[in-house]
Image: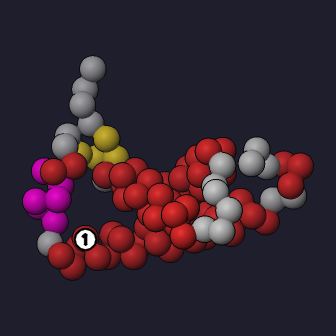
Amino acid sequence: MLNISNYYERLVIDRLWKLAEQADEPFSQAFQEDVACLALNKLPPCYVRNTIDKGINVSEQQYQEMANAVDMAVEQAIQQVLRRPREHRND
């Protein structure tokens, strides 16, 4: 099996963990999965063999642009999930 991953996956998951730590109520796993999927679908793919390789080859400005894109995509995804009627959510 190939050892590749989408670099944005780690950035999105890290962002969700930070938001969950700050939240008044814990995020359910289903909520986090829905948000992560929606956010990742808004971001361009960035496949890497190793996240360390990507980190070494990204300038601070590029990383900040990626982080800003992740913040926006996650926030939009959260709002999209929260707009769903409760009976259509798995949280």
Seen at 33% across and 69% down, the residue is 66
Q: Residues within 10 Å of mark 1 (few under 14, many from 20)?
A: some
Q: Which residue is mark 1?
A: 63
In which quadrant of the rendered image does the N terminus lie? top left
Foreground of the two, 22 or 61? 22
Residue 70 found in image quarter: bottom left
Residue 35 place in picture, x, y as percent = 60, 56
Seen at 86% across and 55% down, the residue is 86
Residue 14 found in image quarter: bottom left
Asked whether 54 falls inside the magenta stretch, the response is yes
Q: Is residue 36 visible?
A: yes
Asked whether 38 falls inside the magenta stretch, the response is no
Q: Report the residue that reaches farthest toward the top.
A: 1
Foreground of the two, 37 or 31? 31
Q: Is residue 42 visible?
A: no
Dot 1 falls on a residue whose secondary structure is: helix
Residue 83 place in picture, x, y as percent = 79, 65
Q: Which residues are magenta?
A: 53-58
Q: Main secondary structure of the magenta part?
A: helix
Seen at 34% across and 47% down, the residue is 6
Left or right: residue 69 compared with residue 49: right
Amino acid bearing label 1: Tyr
Say above or below: 23 vs 37: below
Looking at the rendered structure, the number of numbered marks drawn on it comes to 1
Q: Report the residue that reaches farthest toward the bottom.
A: 61
Say above or below: 24 vs 4: below
Residue 41 place in picture, x, y as percent = 52, 54
